[in-house]
Amino acid sequence: MIQIYHNPRCGKSRNCLAFVTEKETEVEIIKYLETPPSKEALIDLLQKLNLKSIQLVRVKESIWIEQYKNKSLSDDAIIEALAAHPILIERPIVIKGNKAIIGRIPEEVAQFI
């Protein structure tokens, strides 16, 4: 089964979801703004993505700029910020088994699934 961390207000996320549901029959949609992931879920997600915590942050979001930019933050502090403010999580994220990718590029999603 494919899982997608999805934000319906994001065009890239909508496009990714449409692409995946066209190719796959079993898709779980995770509306992460409505049901934010826990800190533990974010740690697991980062392992699947093989990314550092800062690479999952939407650094142009106003919350990031106003509260976190230019601060020296540990990985743990960044993960806590993502858990507290899920709007900061890069999207969409496509998960398949123990691997995940940020699904902004349709060709990469096609190769992944």
Image (cartoon, helix red, strand yellow):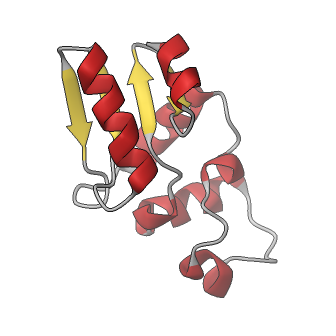
Q: Is residue 79 above or below residue 48?
A: below
Instruction: State the residue in front, 29 or 35.
Output: 29
For image coordinates 29% across by 15% down, the residue present is: 23
Residue 83, visible in the rendered structure: yes
Percent position (x, y) of residue 103? 50, 35
Percent position (x, y) of residue 99? 51, 18
Percent position (x, y) of residue 50? 65, 27
Q: Is residue 94 left or right of residue 43?
A: left
Q: Is residue 4 above or below residue 23?
A: below
Residue 40, visible in the rendered structure: no
For image coordinates 44% across by 59% down, the residue present is: 83
For image coordinates 68% across by 77% down, the residue present is: 68
Q: Is residue 25 left or right of residue 68?
A: left
- Quarter of the image where the N terminus is located: top left
Q: Is residue 63 left or right of residue 87?
A: right
Identify the residue at the far bottom of this view: 66
Q: Quadrant of residue 48?
A: top right
Q: Is residue 71 above or below residue 3?
A: below
Instruction: State the residue in front, 12 or 68.
Output: 12
Q: Quadrant of residue 63?
A: bottom right
Q: Quadrant of residue 62?
A: bottom right
